[in-house]
Image (tube, rainbow, N blue to C red):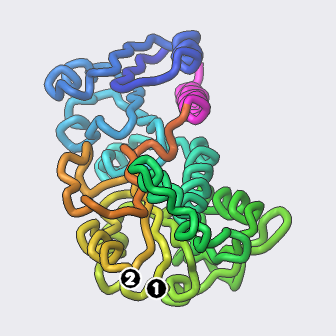
Amino acid sequence: MSLILISEFITSQALETLCSRHEVVYEPDLYKDRSLLIAKLQNVEALIVRNLTQVNEEILDGANKLRVVGRLGVGLENIDLQACFSRNISVIPATGANAESVAEYVVGAAVSLIRGFIPATNATLNGDWPRPRFSNYNECLGKTLGIVGFGSIGRVVATKAHAFGFRCLAFDPMLLGSSVSLEHFSVPLVALSELLAQSDVVTLHLPLLPSTKNLFSATTLDKMKVGSCLINTARGGIVDEVELAQRIRSGRIGGAAIDVFFSEPAKDLQHFSGIENLILTPHIAGVTHESNERVSQMIADEVNRFLGT
């Protein structure tokens, strides 16, 4: 029986799965107290975290028996992978477990942006009846959705978007070939510049790495098709928020849905103030009741499998 420490929220069913085979210390607010977290890591063989526990050298130096870190999510920016590797500590993310939730968010946001639902709602609430204006917005059928990063989430996005009539393009520097075949259709792989020039909506599904940090700078944003929209459910540091806001305000870019921010929790978003066709959400694209259950259960099963009996 191994000792498992869980420093953030996990679902009750997944917790029971772990407790049935191992000794578990579950303190979902432990990430807030670094010194207490380090003290409790003594003799722990498995640590399970979300995105708020910073698993770095300081933490690992106090984890004398740690063998595995389970990440309740897919982003690994809060985990020092090299430090884990050098200590022979495995890292297990919940790859694919929240793909359905993210894909629903992306397609829903794309439809809302193309149809202008947010500005139409605000105008109607203000007592206007802007039917002529919003009757001139577009439908999704035949529009091009550019998917930047074509891993497990990007492919689910493509499948759902295809059902809405979107034509999908993808850019992924890790993939070879001219296209990726999905169940009933294929998605062409193109250069980023080509994707930006053709896409009516661009959606991001990249990790935050040195090579992707500020990838969507002013220069990249200016390569997007005039009037197109941007959706970011990946990581905030990939997009220059101020430059994006300026281009939406000027009409160069038609709108955006932003779920992740350079700094979280996001406290100062004044650069987006007054923009009409805009969706801002607090990093919830991949977080639903159902995805929480899938993510938690996947990590519980994988950690149990890693530790054995």
Residue drawn at the location 26% of the way across and 28% of the way down: 31
* Element assignment for label 1: loop
Q: Position of residue 177 (x, y in %)?
A: 68, 83
Q: Position of residue 132 (x, y in %)?
A: 57, 69
In the image, taking residue 72 as reference, residue 156 lies left or right, namely right
Quick check: can you spot residue 78? yes
Which of the two residues, 206 or 269, is positioned nearer the viewer here? 269
Classed neighbour count for the residue bearing mark 2: other residues with Cα under 10 Å, few (<14), some (14–19), many (≥20):
some
Q: Position of residue 3 (x, y in %)?
A: 41, 17
Report, in whole angstroms, how far the alpha carbon at label 1 lies from the one at label 2: 5 Å
* Element assignment for label 2: loop
Q: Are marks 1 and 2 in contact (CB under 8 Å)?
A: yes
The span picked out in magenta is 289-309
Magenta span contains residue 286? no
Q: Which residue is the site of mark 2?
A: 252
**Quadrant into which the C terminus falls:** top right
The quadrant where residue 17 appears:
top right
In the image, taking residue 268 as reference, residue 235 lies left or right, namely right
Which of the two residues, 207 or 185, is positioned nearer the viewer here? 185
Residue drawn at the location 58% of the way across and 24% of the way down: 308
Tell which residue pokes out farthest to the right in this image: 184
The three-letter code of the residue at mark 1 reads: Val
The three-letter code of the residue at mark 2 reads: Arg
Residue drawn at the location 42% of the way across and 61% of the way down: 207
